[in-house]
Image (cartoon, helix red, strand yellow):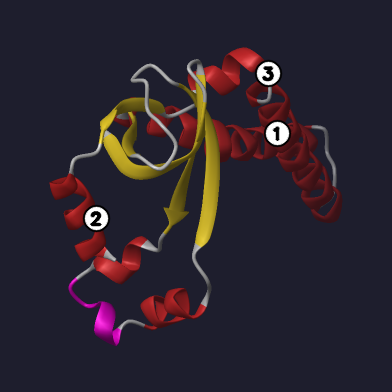
């Protein structure tokens, strides 16, 4: 389970809004002091993400909570985002090749297949059911030890 500490910025008995910070994972590895990617990541400001979740724990504004995503959900999201458009591109390119299209036309058709794959993924994942399936879940209220460990990571 992938877990993250989030700050509750708005709450009601049914719903709450939480805010997390996007961090570069490369800034936490043992060789981050000599890594060019880590230096570039530090140059850009921290990006904040806001999510609306069900308030199953009765959390209040200002509290810190732990949100999480199951590992298999992360894999499914990656397959939807990366593999399906790529397979669409390859599939239409093969069809164009079998149909006798030239290299330039195959490239253009392959690019169109990629775009169609991205449009399909966007359409399928923007529905209310899909958004619920790919949404992180509220796990528990954060205790001070977890918040302290999270601060040390930064």
Residue 17 is at least partly visible in this image: yes
**Secondary structure of the residue carrying numbered label 3:** loop
Q: Which quadrant holds the C terminus?
A: bottom left
**Res 94 visible:** no
Q: Secondary structure at mark 1?
A: helix
Query: Where does label 1 land, which residue?
Result: 117
Left or right position of 26 against 109: left
Badge 3 density bin: few <14, some 14–19, many ≥20, Cα 10 Å:
few
Q: Nearer the viewer, residue 20 or 144?
A: 144
Corner quadrant of residue 123: top right
The rendered magenta stretch, by its main secondary structure, is classed as helix
Left or right of 36? Residue 115 is right
Q: How far across and down, in percent of the image, does residue 40 sit?
A: 46, 79
Q: Residues within 10 Å of mark 2 (few under 14, many from 20)?
A: few
Tags 3 and 2 touching, CB below 8 Å: no
Residue 57: where, in percent of width, then height? 33, 20
The residue that disc 3 covers is: 127
Label 2, on which residue?
150
| Residue 31 counted in the magenta span | yes
Mark 2 and mark 1 lie on one chain; the one further toward the N terminus is 1
Quarter location, residue 96: top right
What segment is highlighted magenta in the picture?
Answer: 30-34
Most foreground residue, 122 or 48:
48
Q: Secondary structure at mark 2?
A: helix
* Residue beneath the point at 68% across and 18% down: 127
Name the residue: 40% across, 82% down: 39
- Relative to residue 111, is residue 122 depicted above or below? above
In front: label 3 or label 2:
2
Quadrant of the frame with the N terminus: top left
User: Going from the N terminus, do you reach mark 1 or mark 3 first?
Assistant: 1
Which of 33 and 120 lies nearest the eye of the viewer? 33
């Amino acid at each position: 389970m992938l877990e993250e500490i989030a700050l509750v910025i708005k709450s009601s008995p049914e719903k709450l809004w939480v805010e997390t910070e996007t961090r570069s994972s490369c800034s936490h590895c043992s060789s981050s002091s000599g890594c060019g990617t880590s230096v570039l990541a530090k140059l850009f400001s921290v990006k904040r993400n806001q999510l609306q979740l069900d308030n199953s724990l009765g959390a209040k504004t200002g509290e810190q909570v732990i949100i999480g995503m199951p590992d298999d959900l992360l894999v499914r999201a990656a397959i939807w985002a990366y593999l399906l458009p790529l397979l669409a591109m390859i599939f239409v390119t093969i069809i164009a090749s079998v149909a006798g299209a030239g290299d330039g036309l195959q490239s253009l058709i392959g690019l169109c297949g990629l775009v169609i794959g991205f449009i399909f993924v966007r359409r399928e994942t923007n529905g209310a059911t899909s958004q619920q399936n790919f949404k992180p879940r509220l796990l528990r209220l954060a205790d001070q030890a977890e918040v302290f460990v999270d601060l040390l990571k930064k």
